[in-house]
Amino acid sequence: MKYHQERESSDEVKRLIVILEALVWKMASLEEINLRGRRWVNGMEAFSVFIQGPTLLFVKVTRKKQEARRFYACAACRDRKDCNFFQWEDEKVSEARQLVRDELNRRRQPPFTHQQYVERYQQFVSLPMENRTFCSDCQILLLPDELDQHSSHHRLGHVSLCQLKRPSLLLLPIENKKTNAQYLFADRTCQFLLDLIVSLDFRRVLCVGTPRLHELIKVRQSENKEPFIKTQLLDIDFRYSQFYSEEEFCHYNMFNHYFFGGKPAFEAFRTFLCQNKGKSVVMVTDPPFGGLVEALAHSFKKIVGEWKTSRNTINEELPIIWIFPYFFETRIRQYFPTLSMLDYQVDYDNHALYKHGKTGRKQSPVRIFTNLPPKDIILPAEEGYRFCSFCERYVSSANRHCEICQACTSKDGRQWKHCKTCNKCVKPSWIHCDTCCRCVLKQHSCGEAGEGCFICGSSEHKRRECPHAAFLERTSSEGTKPCKRKFLETEKDTAGRKSKNQAQKMSTQKKKAMKLVIGKSKRKQKRKKQ
Ligand code: SAH
Ligand code: ZN
Ligand code: ZN
Ligand code: ZN
Ligand code: ZN
Protein backbone atom coordinates (compact mmCIF):
# COMPACT_ATOMS: atom_id res chain seq x y z
CA MET A 1 0.00 0.00 0.00
CA LYS A 2 2.89 2.28 0.75
CA TYR A 3 4.04 1.83 -2.79
CA HIS A 4 0.59 2.74 -3.92
CA GLN A 5 0.35 5.94 -1.93
CA GLU A 6 3.69 7.17 -3.10
CA ARG A 7 2.70 7.15 -6.70
CA GLU A 8 2.24 10.41 -8.50
CA SER A 9 -1.25 11.45 -9.41
CA SER A 10 -0.51 11.07 -13.10
CA ASP A 11 0.40 7.49 -12.32
CA GLU A 12 -2.98 7.17 -10.70
CA VAL A 13 -4.62 8.26 -13.90
CA LYS A 14 -2.49 5.85 -15.86
CA ARG A 15 -3.34 3.11 -13.44
CA LEU A 16 -7.05 3.72 -13.88
CA ILE A 17 -6.64 3.61 -17.61
CA VAL A 18 -4.76 0.33 -17.32
CA ILE A 19 -7.56 -1.10 -15.19
CA LEU A 20 -10.21 0.11 -17.58
CA GLU A 21 -8.31 -1.33 -20.48
CA ALA A 22 -8.19 -4.64 -18.71
CA LEU A 23 -11.87 -4.49 -17.97
CA VAL A 24 -12.90 -3.54 -21.43
CA TRP A 25 -11.07 -6.49 -22.89
CA LYS A 26 -13.76 -7.66 -25.21
CA MET A 27 -14.77 -4.26 -26.41
CA ALA A 28 -14.89 -4.21 -30.14
CA SER A 29 -12.74 -1.21 -30.64
CA LEU A 30 -12.61 -1.24 -34.34
CA GLU A 31 -9.62 1.01 -34.39
CA GLU A 32 -7.68 -2.08 -33.44
CA ILE A 33 -9.12 -3.98 -36.30
CA ASN A 34 -6.41 -6.24 -37.54
CA LEU A 35 -7.77 -8.15 -40.41
CA ARG A 36 -5.04 -10.71 -40.31
CA GLY A 37 -2.46 -8.04 -40.75
CA ARG A 38 -3.97 -6.57 -43.88
CA ARG A 39 -4.77 -3.01 -44.62
CA TRP A 40 -7.91 -1.18 -45.46
CA VAL A 41 -7.55 0.78 -48.64
CA ASN A 42 -10.19 2.61 -50.42
CA GLY A 43 -9.11 5.59 -52.34
CA MET A 44 -7.88 6.83 -49.01
CA GLU A 45 -4.63 5.99 -47.38
CA ALA A 46 -4.67 2.84 -45.29
CA PHE A 47 -6.55 3.46 -42.10
CA SER A 48 -6.99 1.31 -39.12
CA VAL A 49 -8.70 3.65 -36.73
CA PHE A 50 -11.72 5.85 -36.83
CA ILE A 51 -13.76 8.10 -34.69
CA GLN A 52 -15.69 6.45 -31.88
CA GLY A 53 -18.07 9.22 -31.02
CA PRO A 54 -17.90 11.34 -27.93
CA THR A 55 -15.74 10.60 -24.99
CA LEU A 56 -16.76 9.47 -21.55
CA LEU A 57 -16.24 11.78 -18.64
CA PHE A 58 -14.19 10.34 -15.82
CA VAL A 59 -13.39 11.94 -12.55
CA LYS A 60 -10.30 11.79 -10.46
CA VAL A 61 -11.07 12.51 -6.84
CA THR A 62 -8.43 13.72 -4.43
CA ARG A 63 -9.89 12.84 -1.10
CA LYS A 64 -7.71 14.98 1.15
CA LYS A 65 -8.50 18.18 -0.64
CA GLN A 66 -12.07 17.10 -1.33
CA GLU A 67 -11.68 18.07 -4.92
CA ALA A 68 -12.51 16.31 -8.09
CA ARG A 69 -10.93 16.94 -11.42
CA ARG A 70 -12.70 15.53 -14.39
CA PHE A 71 -11.23 14.33 -17.62
CA TYR A 72 -12.44 13.00 -20.90
CA ALA A 73 -11.28 9.74 -22.42
CA CYS A 74 -12.45 7.87 -25.46
CA ALA A 75 -15.59 5.84 -24.93
CA ALA A 76 -14.68 2.93 -27.11
CA CYS A 77 -10.96 2.60 -27.54
CA ARG A 78 -9.18 0.20 -25.26
CA ASP A 79 -5.71 0.96 -26.28
CA ARG A 80 -4.15 4.30 -25.50
CA LYS A 81 -1.66 3.61 -28.29
CA ASP A 82 -4.43 3.78 -30.82
CA CYS A 83 -6.53 6.48 -29.30
CA ASN A 84 -4.75 8.54 -26.74
CA PHE A 85 -7.57 11.00 -26.32
CA PHE A 86 -7.16 12.49 -22.88
CA GLN A 87 -8.20 15.91 -21.77
CA TRP A 88 -8.92 17.59 -18.48
CA GLU A 89 -12.43 18.96 -18.45
CA ASP A 90 -11.24 22.47 -17.64
CA GLU A 91 -8.31 22.38 -20.03
CA LYS A 92 -8.15 24.75 -22.98
CA VAL A 93 -7.31 23.11 -26.27
CA SER A 94 -5.01 25.05 -28.54
CA GLU A 95 -6.09 25.67 -32.10
CA ALA A 96 -3.15 23.67 -33.41
CA ARG A 97 -4.03 20.69 -31.29
CA GLN A 98 -7.65 20.91 -32.37
CA LEU A 99 -6.57 20.92 -36.01
CA VAL A 100 -4.49 17.81 -35.48
CA ARG A 101 -7.44 16.16 -33.76
CA ASP A 102 -9.85 17.11 -36.54
CA GLU A 103 -7.48 15.71 -39.10
CA LEU A 104 -7.11 12.45 -37.17
CA ASN A 105 -10.87 12.14 -36.83
CA ARG A 106 -11.35 12.81 -40.52
CA ARG A 107 -8.97 9.98 -41.32
CA ARG A 108 -10.75 7.67 -38.91
CA GLN A 109 -14.14 7.96 -40.57
CA PRO A 110 -15.58 5.15 -42.66
CA PRO A 111 -14.71 5.77 -46.33
CA PHE A 112 -18.33 6.17 -47.40
CA THR A 113 -21.49 7.55 -45.88
CA HIS A 114 -24.25 5.10 -45.12
CA GLN A 115 -26.24 6.49 -48.03
CA GLN A 116 -23.29 5.94 -50.36
CA TYR A 117 -22.97 2.39 -49.08
CA VAL A 118 -26.64 1.77 -49.83
CA GLU A 119 -26.20 3.07 -53.39
CA ARG A 120 -23.11 0.92 -53.85
CA TYR A 121 -25.06 -2.11 -52.66
CA GLN A 122 -27.80 -1.49 -55.19
CA GLN A 123 -25.22 -1.26 -57.95
CA PHE A 124 -23.51 -4.37 -56.64
CA VAL A 125 -26.58 -6.62 -56.65
CA SER A 126 -27.48 -5.50 -60.16
CA LEU A 127 -24.13 -6.81 -61.44
CA PRO A 128 -24.04 -10.26 -63.00
CA MET A 129 -22.80 -12.76 -60.43
CA GLU A 130 -19.44 -13.30 -62.14
CA ASN A 131 -18.68 -9.61 -61.66
CA ARG A 132 -19.60 -9.50 -57.99
CA THR A 133 -16.36 -9.36 -56.02
CA PHE A 134 -15.69 -8.90 -52.34
CA CYS A 135 -12.24 -7.78 -51.20
CA SER A 136 -11.39 -9.83 -48.13
CA ASP A 137 -8.44 -7.64 -47.30
CA CYS A 138 -10.46 -4.45 -47.35
CA GLN A 139 -13.72 -6.07 -46.26
CA ILE A 140 -15.63 -4.25 -48.94
CA LEU A 141 -17.93 -5.07 -51.84
CA LEU A 142 -16.15 -3.86 -54.96
CA LEU A 143 -17.66 -2.04 -57.90
CA PRO A 144 -16.24 -2.82 -61.37
CA ASP A 145 -14.05 0.29 -61.65
CA GLU A 146 -12.43 -0.47 -58.29
CA LEU A 147 -11.20 -3.95 -59.19
CA ASP A 148 -7.79 -2.77 -60.44
CA GLN A 149 -7.07 -1.02 -57.21
CA HIS A 150 -7.56 -4.29 -55.30
CA SER A 151 -5.92 -6.59 -57.85
CA SER A 152 -3.15 -7.62 -55.45
CA HIS A 153 -5.59 -8.30 -52.58
CA HIS A 154 -7.33 -11.48 -51.54
CA ARG A 155 -10.69 -11.33 -53.22
CA LEU A 156 -13.74 -13.47 -53.30
CA GLY A 157 -15.53 -13.71 -56.65
CA HIS A 158 -18.99 -14.81 -57.67
CA VAL A 159 -20.63 -13.40 -54.57
CA SER A 160 -24.12 -14.91 -54.49
CA LEU A 161 -27.29 -13.32 -53.19
CA CYS A 162 -27.25 -16.01 -50.52
CA GLN A 163 -23.85 -14.83 -49.35
CA LEU A 164 -25.08 -11.25 -49.28
CA LYS A 165 -27.81 -12.36 -46.93
CA ARG A 166 -25.24 -13.64 -44.46
CA PRO A 167 -22.74 -10.79 -44.05
CA SER A 168 -21.55 -12.22 -40.74
CA LEU A 169 -20.13 -15.15 -42.71
CA LEU A 170 -18.60 -12.93 -45.37
CA LEU A 171 -17.02 -10.44 -43.01
CA LEU A 172 -14.15 -11.53 -40.82
CA PRO A 173 -14.99 -11.28 -37.15
CA ILE A 174 -13.16 -8.32 -35.71
CA GLU A 175 -9.93 -9.45 -34.21
CA ASN A 176 -6.96 -7.81 -32.74
CA LYS A 177 -3.82 -9.05 -31.15
CA LYS A 178 -5.22 -8.97 -27.65
CA THR A 179 -8.77 -10.00 -28.09
CA ASN A 180 -11.15 -11.33 -30.60
CA ALA A 181 -13.75 -8.72 -30.13
CA GLN A 182 -16.62 -10.17 -32.13
CA TYR A 183 -18.17 -13.34 -30.82
CA LEU A 184 -20.80 -14.64 -33.16
CA PHE A 185 -23.61 -16.81 -31.85
CA ALA A 186 -23.46 -20.49 -32.65
CA ASP A 187 -26.46 -21.56 -34.75
CA ARG A 188 -27.92 -23.38 -31.77
CA THR A 189 -28.06 -20.18 -29.71
CA CYS A 190 -29.12 -17.88 -32.53
CA GLN A 191 -32.00 -20.15 -33.51
CA PHE A 192 -33.01 -20.48 -29.86
CA LEU A 193 -33.20 -16.69 -29.53
CA LEU A 194 -35.23 -16.35 -32.71
CA ASP A 195 -37.64 -19.11 -31.69
CA LEU A 196 -38.04 -17.45 -28.33
CA ILE A 197 -38.84 -14.10 -29.93
CA VAL A 198 -41.41 -15.72 -32.22
CA SER A 199 -43.00 -17.75 -29.43
CA LEU A 200 -43.39 -14.68 -27.24
CA ASP A 201 -45.17 -12.82 -30.04
CA PHE A 202 -42.68 -10.04 -30.60
CA ARG A 203 -42.87 -8.27 -33.96
CA ARG A 204 -39.86 -6.02 -33.74
CA VAL A 205 -36.36 -6.70 -32.48
CA LEU A 206 -33.85 -4.01 -31.62
CA CYS A 207 -30.54 -5.80 -32.02
CA VAL A 208 -27.84 -3.95 -30.08
CA GLY A 209 -24.53 -5.57 -30.95
CA THR A 210 -26.16 -8.76 -32.26
CA PRO A 211 -25.46 -8.76 -36.01
CA ARG A 212 -25.97 -12.48 -36.39
CA LEU A 213 -29.42 -12.43 -34.84
CA HIS A 214 -30.33 -9.45 -37.04
CA GLU A 215 -29.17 -11.43 -40.02
CA LEU A 216 -31.13 -14.55 -39.06
CA ILE A 217 -34.32 -12.51 -38.70
CA LYS A 218 -33.71 -11.01 -42.15
CA VAL A 219 -33.21 -14.49 -43.62
CA ARG A 220 -36.53 -15.47 -42.02
CA GLN A 221 -38.17 -12.41 -43.62
CA SER A 222 -36.90 -13.42 -47.04
CA GLU A 223 -38.51 -16.83 -46.54
CA ASN A 224 -41.84 -15.05 -46.05
CA LYS A 225 -42.48 -16.73 -42.74
CA GLU A 226 -45.45 -15.57 -40.67
CA PRO A 227 -45.65 -13.51 -38.59
CA PHE A 228 -43.41 -10.91 -40.16
CA ILE A 229 -40.72 -9.79 -37.73
CA LYS A 230 -38.82 -6.58 -38.26
CA THR A 231 -35.33 -5.96 -37.05
CA GLN A 232 -32.91 -3.08 -36.60
CA LEU A 233 -29.22 -3.45 -35.81
CA LEU A 234 -27.27 -0.95 -33.75
CA ASP A 235 -23.56 -1.76 -33.84
CA ILE A 236 -20.19 -0.08 -33.91
CA ASP A 237 -19.04 -2.27 -36.79
CA PHE A 238 -19.72 0.03 -39.70
CA ARG A 239 -18.90 -2.67 -42.26
CA TYR A 240 -22.54 -3.65 -41.87
CA SER A 241 -23.58 -0.35 -43.53
CA GLN A 242 -22.64 -2.06 -46.78
CA PHE A 243 -25.43 -4.58 -46.45
CA TYR A 244 -28.27 -2.82 -44.66
CA SER A 245 -30.39 0.24 -45.28
CA GLU A 246 -30.50 3.20 -42.94
CA GLU A 247 -33.68 1.79 -41.42
CA GLU A 248 -32.05 -1.55 -40.75
CA PHE A 249 -28.68 -0.51 -39.40
CA CYS A 250 -27.30 2.36 -37.35
CA HIS A 251 -23.61 2.82 -36.72
CA TYR A 252 -23.81 3.16 -32.96
CA ASN A 253 -21.65 3.20 -29.85
CA MET A 254 -23.45 1.48 -27.00
CA PHE A 255 -21.05 2.80 -24.38
CA ASN A 256 -22.26 6.34 -24.79
CA HIS A 257 -25.48 5.98 -26.79
CA TYR A 258 -23.93 7.76 -29.74
CA PHE A 259 -25.30 7.61 -33.27
CA PHE A 260 -22.56 8.24 -35.80
CA GLY A 261 -25.13 9.09 -38.47
CA GLY A 262 -26.41 12.03 -36.45
CA LYS A 263 -30.04 13.07 -36.28
CA PRO A 264 -31.38 11.03 -39.22
CA ALA A 265 -29.86 7.87 -37.75
CA PHE A 266 -31.25 8.64 -34.33
CA GLU A 267 -34.68 9.27 -35.88
CA ALA A 268 -34.53 5.93 -37.70
CA PHE A 269 -33.85 4.28 -34.36
CA ARG A 270 -36.60 6.16 -32.55
CA THR A 271 -39.14 5.46 -35.28
CA PHE A 272 -38.32 1.78 -35.20
CA LEU A 273 -38.50 1.51 -31.43
CA CYS A 274 -41.61 3.59 -30.93
CA GLN A 275 -43.76 2.60 -33.90
CA ASN A 276 -47.10 0.95 -33.21
CA LYS A 277 -47.09 2.78 -29.86
CA GLY A 278 -44.01 0.86 -28.78
CA LYS A 279 -45.94 -2.41 -28.80
CA SER A 280 -44.38 -5.87 -29.25
CA VAL A 281 -40.77 -4.77 -29.44
CA VAL A 282 -37.88 -6.45 -27.64
CA MET A 283 -34.30 -5.32 -27.24
CA VAL A 284 -31.62 -8.01 -27.56
CA THR A 285 -28.07 -7.08 -26.71
CA ASP A 286 -24.78 -8.95 -26.45
CA PRO A 287 -22.24 -6.32 -25.50
CA PRO A 288 -18.51 -6.76 -25.13
CA PHE A 289 -17.91 -8.26 -21.69
CA GLY A 290 -15.89 -5.38 -20.39
CA GLY A 291 -16.46 -4.07 -16.94
CA LEU A 292 -18.30 -0.99 -18.04
CA VAL A 293 -21.72 -2.29 -17.03
CA GLU A 294 -22.38 1.20 -15.73
CA ALA A 295 -21.84 2.76 -19.16
CA LEU A 296 -23.95 0.11 -20.87
CA ALA A 297 -26.75 0.51 -18.33
CA HIS A 298 -26.68 4.24 -18.89
CA SER A 299 -27.18 3.77 -22.64
CA PHE A 300 -29.82 1.09 -22.21
CA LYS A 301 -31.74 3.35 -19.86
CA LYS A 302 -31.72 5.98 -22.58
CA ILE A 303 -33.16 3.45 -25.00
CA VAL A 304 -35.80 2.51 -22.42
CA GLY A 305 -36.53 6.20 -21.86
CA GLU A 306 -37.04 6.73 -25.58
CA TRP A 307 -39.40 3.77 -25.72
CA LYS A 308 -41.36 5.06 -22.72
CA THR A 309 -42.24 8.25 -24.60
CA SER A 310 -44.34 6.09 -26.92
CA ARG A 311 -46.21 4.34 -24.11
CA ASN A 312 -49.05 5.73 -22.06
CA THR A 313 -48.33 4.01 -18.81
CA ILE A 314 -45.16 4.63 -16.84
CA ASN A 315 -44.99 1.33 -15.01
CA GLU A 316 -44.26 -0.75 -18.05
CA GLU A 317 -40.84 -2.02 -18.95
CA LEU A 318 -39.24 -2.46 -22.32
CA PRO A 319 -38.64 -6.20 -22.72
CA ILE A 320 -34.89 -6.75 -22.59
CA ILE A 321 -32.69 -9.73 -23.36
CA TRP A 322 -29.17 -8.91 -22.23
CA ILE A 323 -26.53 -11.54 -22.86
CA PHE A 324 -23.61 -11.44 -20.46
CA PRO A 325 -21.48 -13.74 -18.24
CA TYR A 326 -23.16 -15.01 -15.08
CA PHE A 327 -20.61 -13.44 -12.77
CA PHE A 328 -21.90 -10.01 -13.71
CA GLU A 329 -25.30 -10.85 -12.21
CA THR A 330 -24.94 -8.60 -9.18
CA ARG A 331 -23.70 -5.70 -11.22
CA ILE A 332 -26.39 -5.96 -13.86
CA ARG A 333 -29.10 -6.23 -11.23
CA GLN A 334 -27.72 -3.18 -9.52
CA TYR A 335 -28.81 -1.17 -12.55
CA PHE A 336 -31.71 -3.31 -13.73
CA PRO A 337 -33.20 -4.99 -10.63
CA THR A 338 -36.02 -6.52 -12.64
CA LEU A 339 -33.73 -8.59 -14.84
CA SER A 340 -33.34 -12.19 -13.84
CA MET A 341 -30.71 -14.61 -15.01
CA LEU A 342 -31.61 -17.76 -16.89
CA ASP A 343 -29.63 -20.98 -16.85
CA TYR A 344 -29.38 -21.18 -20.64
CA GLN A 345 -25.77 -21.33 -21.78
CA VAL A 346 -25.13 -19.00 -24.69
CA ASP A 347 -22.39 -20.18 -26.97
CA TYR A 348 -20.37 -18.84 -29.81
CA ASP A 349 -18.91 -20.04 -33.06
CA ASN A 350 -15.55 -18.42 -32.79
CA HIS A 351 -14.79 -18.75 -29.11
CA ALA A 352 -13.19 -21.97 -27.96
CA LEU A 353 -13.78 -21.21 -24.31
CA TYR A 354 -17.41 -20.27 -24.58
CA LYS A 355 -18.88 -23.42 -25.91
CA HIS A 356 -21.84 -25.31 -24.68
CA GLY A 357 -21.24 -28.85 -23.57
CA LYS A 358 -20.42 -31.03 -20.62
CA THR A 359 -17.48 -33.21 -21.41
CA GLY A 360 -14.07 -32.08 -22.50
CA ARG A 361 -14.91 -28.53 -23.32
CA LYS A 362 -15.55 -25.90 -20.75
CA GLN A 363 -19.10 -24.83 -20.20
CA SER A 364 -20.00 -21.37 -21.38
CA PRO A 365 -20.31 -18.81 -18.58
CA VAL A 366 -22.53 -16.60 -20.73
CA ARG A 367 -26.19 -16.29 -19.77
CA ILE A 368 -29.39 -14.48 -20.64
CA PHE A 369 -30.60 -11.68 -18.38
CA THR A 370 -34.20 -10.73 -18.98
CA ASN A 371 -37.22 -9.01 -17.53
CA LEU A 372 -39.52 -11.44 -19.35
CA PRO A 373 -41.15 -13.98 -17.01
CA PRO A 374 -38.60 -16.83 -16.69
CA LYS A 375 -41.38 -19.44 -16.67
CA ASP A 376 -42.29 -18.43 -20.22
CA ILE A 377 -38.81 -19.10 -21.49
CA ILE A 378 -38.74 -22.81 -22.19
CA LEU A 379 -35.19 -24.08 -22.29
CA PRO A 380 -34.51 -27.07 -24.58
CA ALA A 381 -35.16 -30.39 -22.82
CA GLU A 382 -32.85 -32.15 -25.28
CA GLU A 383 -29.99 -30.16 -23.78
CA GLY A 384 -30.97 -31.31 -20.30
CA TYR A 385 -32.83 -28.24 -19.05
CA ARG A 386 -35.86 -28.98 -16.89
CA PHE A 387 -38.59 -27.02 -15.15
CA CYS A 388 -38.33 -26.35 -11.41
CA SER A 389 -41.86 -25.90 -10.15
CA PHE A 390 -40.70 -24.20 -6.94
CA CYS A 391 -38.58 -21.62 -8.73
CA GLU A 392 -40.97 -21.47 -11.68
CA ARG A 393 -38.19 -21.42 -14.19
CA TYR A 394 -36.21 -23.76 -16.38
CA VAL A 395 -32.87 -24.79 -14.93
CA SER A 396 -29.86 -26.75 -16.12
CA SER A 397 -29.83 -30.48 -15.47
CA ALA A 398 -27.31 -30.40 -12.62
CA ASN A 399 -28.90 -27.42 -10.89
CA ARG A 400 -30.56 -28.84 -7.76
CA HIS A 401 -33.22 -27.07 -5.78
CA CYS A 402 -31.78 -26.31 -2.33
CA GLU A 403 -34.36 -26.70 0.44
CA ILE A 404 -32.59 -24.23 2.70
CA CYS A 405 -31.94 -21.50 0.13
CA GLN A 406 -35.30 -22.28 -1.45
CA ALA A 407 -33.86 -21.85 -4.89
CA CYS A 408 -31.99 -23.64 -7.63
CA THR A 409 -28.70 -22.11 -6.69
CA SER A 410 -26.14 -23.20 -9.27
CA LYS A 411 -24.86 -20.43 -11.48
CA ASP A 412 -22.30 -22.28 -13.53
CA GLY A 413 -24.21 -25.40 -14.56
CA ARG A 414 -22.55 -27.68 -11.99
CA GLN A 415 -24.29 -28.95 -8.88
CA TRP A 416 -23.63 -26.64 -5.95
CA LYS A 417 -23.67 -27.64 -2.28
CA HIS A 418 -25.08 -25.88 0.74
CA CYS A 419 -22.72 -24.59 3.44
CA LYS A 420 -24.48 -24.31 6.77
CA THR A 421 -21.92 -21.88 8.18
CA CYS A 422 -22.07 -19.47 5.23
CA ASN A 423 -25.77 -20.16 4.98
CA LYS A 424 -25.68 -20.34 1.22
CA CYS A 425 -24.89 -22.68 -1.61
CA VAL A 426 -21.37 -22.68 -2.96
CA LYS A 427 -19.41 -24.21 -5.83
CA PRO A 428 -18.74 -27.95 -5.52
CA SER A 429 -14.97 -27.36 -5.47
CA TRP A 430 -15.15 -25.10 -2.43
CA ILE A 431 -14.69 -25.96 1.24
CA HIS A 432 -15.46 -23.91 4.30
CA CYS A 433 -12.27 -22.40 5.74
CA ASP A 434 -12.45 -21.39 9.40
CA THR A 435 -9.56 -18.98 9.08
CA CYS A 436 -11.08 -17.12 6.17
CA CYS A 437 -14.57 -17.46 7.66
CA ARG A 438 -16.00 -18.35 4.30
CA CYS A 439 -16.09 -20.98 1.63
CA VAL A 440 -13.05 -20.94 -0.61
CA LEU A 441 -11.15 -23.15 -3.02
CA LYS A 442 -9.28 -25.95 -1.22
CA GLN A 443 -5.92 -24.71 -2.47
CA HIS A 444 -6.31 -21.07 -1.52
CA SER A 445 -3.68 -18.93 0.15
CA CYS A 446 -5.22 -18.76 3.55
CA GLY A 447 -6.01 -15.36 4.95
CA GLU A 448 -5.94 -13.71 1.55
CA ALA A 449 -9.22 -14.95 0.24
CA GLY A 450 -12.11 -12.71 -0.51
CA GLU A 451 -10.86 -10.13 -2.90
CA GLY A 452 -12.60 -11.72 -5.84
CA CYS A 453 -11.55 -11.35 -9.43
CA PHE A 454 -9.68 -8.21 -10.24
CA ILE A 455 -10.48 -8.40 -13.92
CA CYS A 456 -14.24 -8.70 -13.91
CA GLY A 457 -15.04 -8.00 -10.27
CA SER A 458 -16.66 -11.36 -9.69
CA SER A 459 -16.43 -12.89 -6.23
CA GLU A 460 -16.96 -16.27 -7.86
CA HIS A 461 -13.41 -16.67 -9.06
CA LYS A 462 -9.94 -15.20 -8.94
CA ARG A 463 -8.08 -13.35 -11.63
CA ARG A 464 -6.30 -16.55 -12.57
CA GLU A 465 -9.55 -18.40 -13.24
CA CYS A 466 -11.20 -15.52 -15.04
CA PRO A 467 -12.32 -16.61 -18.48
CA HIS A 468 -11.36 -13.15 -19.66
CA ALA A 469 -7.81 -13.56 -18.43
CA ALA A 470 -7.54 -17.04 -19.85
CA PHE A 471 -8.52 -15.68 -23.17
CA LEU A 472 -6.23 -12.71 -22.95
CA GLU A 473 -3.28 -14.86 -22.03
CA ARG A 474 -4.01 -17.22 -24.83
CA THR A 475 -4.18 -14.51 -27.45
CA SER A 476 -1.45 -12.32 -26.08
CA SER A 477 1.12 -15.00 -26.88
CA GLU A 478 0.77 -13.89 -30.47
CA GLY A 479 2.62 -10.70 -29.85
CA THR A 480 4.36 -8.74 -27.21
CA LYS A 481 2.06 -9.81 -24.38
CA PRO A 482 1.06 -6.30 -23.47
CA CYS A 483 -1.97 -7.50 -21.57
CA LYS A 484 -0.12 -9.89 -19.37
CA ARG A 485 2.19 -7.18 -18.33
CA LYS A 486 -0.68 -4.87 -17.57
CA PHE A 487 -2.37 -7.45 -15.43
CA LEU A 488 0.76 -7.87 -13.45
CA GLU A 489 0.78 -4.16 -12.90
CA THR A 490 -2.74 -4.21 -11.63
CA GLU A 491 -1.90 -7.14 -9.39
CA LYS A 492 0.34 -4.95 -7.30
CA ASP A 493 -2.72 -3.14 -6.26
CA THR A 494 -4.51 -6.19 -4.98
CA ALA A 495 -1.48 -7.78 -3.38
CA GLY A 496 -1.62 -7.61 0.36
CA ARG A 497 -5.35 -7.41 0.58
CA LYS A 498 -6.50 -9.63 3.37
CA SER A 499 -10.22 -10.02 3.06
CA LYS A 500 -13.05 -8.41 1.23
CA ASN A 501 -13.99 -6.27 4.21
CA GLN A 502 -10.48 -5.19 4.81
CA ALA A 503 -10.03 -4.45 1.17
CA GLN A 504 -13.09 -2.29 1.19
CA LYS A 505 -11.87 -0.44 4.26
CA MET A 506 -8.56 0.15 2.62
CA SER A 507 -10.04 1.46 -0.52
CA THR A 508 -12.13 4.00 1.35
CA GLN A 509 -9.01 5.04 3.18
CA LYS A 510 -7.18 5.60 -0.04
CA LYS A 511 -6.29 9.22 -0.31
CA LYS A 512 -6.90 9.25 -3.98
CA ALA A 513 -9.86 7.47 -5.41
CA MET A 514 -10.85 7.14 -8.97
CA LYS A 515 -14.41 7.04 -10.05
CA LEU A 516 -16.04 6.82 -13.37
CA VAL A 517 -18.84 9.25 -13.81
CA ILE A 518 -21.16 9.24 -16.69
CA GLY A 519 -22.99 12.46 -16.87
CA LYS A 520 -24.10 13.41 -13.40
CA SER A 521 -23.24 10.57 -11.13
CA LYS A 522 -25.43 10.23 -8.08
CA ARG A 523 -22.62 8.47 -6.33
CA LYS A 524 -20.39 11.45 -6.70
CA GLN A 525 -23.00 13.73 -5.24
CA LYS A 526 -23.34 11.39 -2.28
CA ARG A 527 -19.61 11.42 -1.77
CA LYS A 528 -19.55 15.16 -1.62
CA LYS A 529 -22.20 15.17 1.10
CA GLN A 530 -20.17 12.87 3.32
N1 SAH B 1 -23.16 -12.67 -30.43
C1 SAH B 1 -23.46 -11.53 -31.26
C2 SAH B 1 -22.23 -10.66 -31.44
C3 SAH B 1 -21.68 -10.18 -30.11
S1 SAH B 1 -20.02 -9.59 -30.23
C4 SAH B 1 -23.98 -12.03 -32.59
O1 SAH B 1 -23.61 -13.13 -32.99
O2 SAH B 1 -24.80 -11.36 -33.22
C5 SAH B 1 -20.26 -7.93 -29.73
C6 SAH B 1 -20.89 -7.07 -30.78
O3 SAH B 1 -20.96 -5.77 -30.26
C7 SAH B 1 -20.12 -7.00 -32.07
O4 SAH B 1 -21.00 -7.08 -33.16
C8 SAH B 1 -19.43 -5.66 -32.01
O5 SAH B 1 -19.23 -5.09 -33.29
C9 SAH B 1 -20.41 -4.87 -31.20
N2 SAH B 1 -19.79 -3.79 -30.43
C10 SAH B 1 -18.60 -3.79 -29.79
N3 SAH B 1 -18.38 -2.63 -29.18
C11 SAH B 1 -19.45 -1.86 -29.43
C12 SAH B 1 -19.81 -0.54 -29.09
N4 SAH B 1 -19.01 0.22 -28.35
N5 SAH B 1 -20.99 -0.07 -29.52
C13 SAH B 1 -21.81 -0.84 -30.28
N6 SAH B 1 -21.52 -2.09 -30.65
C14 SAH B 1 -20.36 -2.59 -30.23
ZN1 ZN C 1 -8.78 -4.62 -51.32
ZN1 ZN D 1 -28.47 -23.69 -0.34
ZN1 ZN E 1 -18.98 -21.86 3.94
ZN1 ZN F 1 -8.44 -19.95 4.34
Image (cartoon, rainbow, N blue to C red):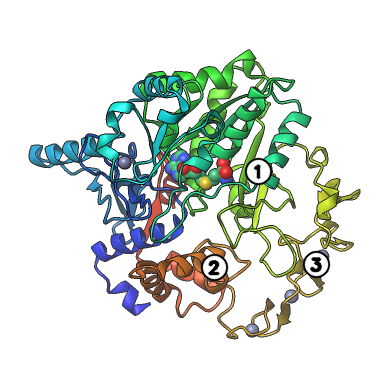
Q: Is any part of residue 296 visible from this angle?
A: no
The reply to whether discs 2 and 3 touch (Cβ–Cβ < 8 Å) is no
Query: How far is the residue under mark 2 from the one under mark 3?
Result: 22 Å
Quadrant of the rendering where the N terminus is positioned: bottom left
Residue plotted at (80% across, 67% down): 415
Judged from the image, the quadrant occupied by ligand 5 is bottom right
The answer to whether residue 395 is above or below residue 467 is above
Say which quarter of the image contains residue 131: top left
Label annotation for residue 337? 1
Query: How far is the residue under mark 1 from the one under mark 3?
Result: 26 Å
Left-right relation of 4 to 156? left
The answer to whether residue 120 is above or below residue 515 is above
Residue plotted at (70% across, 53% down): 345
Look at discs 2 and 1 and give the one toward the viewer.
2
Q: Residue 463 location, x and y as percent? A: 52, 71
Q: Which of marks 2 and 1 is nearer the N terminus?
A: 1
Q: Residue 351 location, x and y as percent? A: 56, 57
